[in-house]
Image: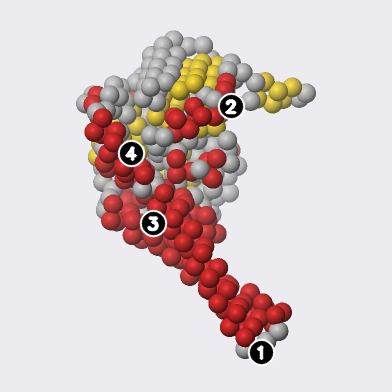
Amino acid sequence: MQRTLISTYPIYASGFTPAWLRLLGARIGKNVEISTVETIPHLTWIRDNSFLADHSSASTTRHSSHWVHIGTTVIGERSFVGNSGIVGPDQDVPDDSLIAVLSTNPGQVDAGSSWLGQNPHQIPRRVVDSDSTATYEPTRKLRILRGIVECCRIIPQMFSNLLDLLTIWVLTIIYMQFWFSDLSQAEALAWTSLLAWPVLLVSGTIAAIIPIVTKWLLVGRFRVQDRPLFSSFVWRGELIDVFVESLAIPGIIRMSLGSPIFNLWNRLLGVRIGKNVWCETWWLPEFDLVTLENGASVNRGTVVQTHLFQDRVMSMEPVTLEDSATLGPNSFTLPGSSIGQRATIGPGSLIQRHEIVPADTCWQGNPAQYIPVSSAGFPRDSVHDENHGDAQTLNHNAASDSVVADEADNTQQTLVSASKSK
């Protein structure tokens, strides 16, 4: 199942994904939406109108000393499992329920409930009004139009194959030219091997540029807005993601993570990136809504999430990392959030929607909780010494009052995205 996320990536987060899982043995209901999921298909039942977002897990096995736990999983009708949400074996999600991003299923719970966190706690859930014909009950015309757009997902694979063939053809011509010029086969092969570096660099550069051109042609600039699932904008956004994941990421872009080349590529896609930024993730879904200011650090495996789906409506808002802010490995920031100057988010943390992290503070957890700088144990710049303790405490106290006052609103608006970013 993990290998299919690479080898058959273009079929995921599409109208064909439910059919694909049915072929693998899963029970999939009507109008089900699945981005990417890891599961044991024949032990999984996903009921009508439910939604599984990127990197969700259902019916995954649990291992411990001398035993392995394998069991069934049922996702109830109109339920939502968010990005990296986990529903374990022998656990079911009741109807009309929500398992938030980076969260786990608490077990047997009431229908219509919503849960957030690694040690999940119940949160309020806001209902989003929308036209059902563009969300849960699309017309036949909308389904056909979606199918037409999604058929274009084969184009990135065609470009990839064409670039591979052209690269082989160019290297073959080079080899034959050297061989026919009275060089031995070994000498011709040696020269061809040396010249293979610039040839592959050109090929990788072309593969990285094609998604940039496609993004500006298909969508232009991403803006703050709400769009229903069955809309051309959402389909085109998913198509751009396939171009990025199938063409750019496998080659030169993956190798350039954390380098100025990667920052330049992101700037060309629309990301606002300052000087001396360390960015080690390509999961920046709506590029124009991401701002990484001078000296910011975005570590490996993080998701700077700028959109969320609730009730099948895609809501997009900006995310900002201010000067010298740090987002730890495998962490999430949700739309509308901001990490203040020199603030540090520890590994595996979740910054909730519209949450503002004060400057010069440390936070960790799912959802993220304040921890004193002195006990955080994170590497810090010299600016964070004992002389700054009082200022940091005052800053935190003022910020905590604001956070507590807004906690209910933040958790109520904590949604779960279906984006891949990927």
Q: Earlier in the sequence, mark 1 or mark 4?
A: 4
Quadrant location, the N terminus: top right
Do the residues under discs 3 and 2 have CB atoms within 8 angstroms?
no
| Residue at mark 1 to residue at mark 3: CA–CA distance | 42 Å
Q: How many marks?
A: 4
Asked if the residue under mark 4 is in contact with the one under mark 3, i.e. CB atoms within 8 Å, the reply is no
Q: Residue at x 54, y 48 (%)?
A: 300
Is residue 246 shown to the viewer in this render? Answer: yes
Q: Residues within 10 Å of mark 3 (few under 14, many from 20)?
A: many
Residue denoted by label 1: 182
* Neighbourhood count class around disc 1 (C-alpha, 10 Å): few under 14, some 14–19, many 20 upward: few
Q: Crowdedness of circle 2 by 10 Å Cα count: few (<14), some, many (20+)?
A: many
- Mark 3–mark 2 distance (CA, rounded to whole Å): 33 Å
Seen from this angle, which residue lies furthest right? 66
Most extreme residue toward the bottom is 182
Q: Which residue is disc 2 drawn over?
A: 40
* Mark found first going from the N terminus, 1 or 3: 1
x 57%, y 79%: residue: 174
The residue carrying mark 3 is 211
- Marks 1/4: CA–CA distance: 55 Å
Q: Which residue is mark 4?
A: 147
Image vertical order of residue 91 relative to residue 390, above or below: above
Q: CA distance from mark 2 to mark 4?
A: 27 Å
Q: Looking at the image, tell me whether mark 1 or mark 2 is earlier in sequence order.
A: 2
Q: In front here: 204 or 174?
A: 174
Q: Determine whether 282 is above or below 116 in the image.
A: below
Looking at marks 2 and 4 on the same chain, the residue that comes earlier in the sequence is marked by 2
Q: Which of the two marks, 2 or 4, is nearer to us in this view?
A: 4
- Residue type at mark 1? Asp
Q: Earlier in the sequence, mark 3 or mark 4?
A: 4
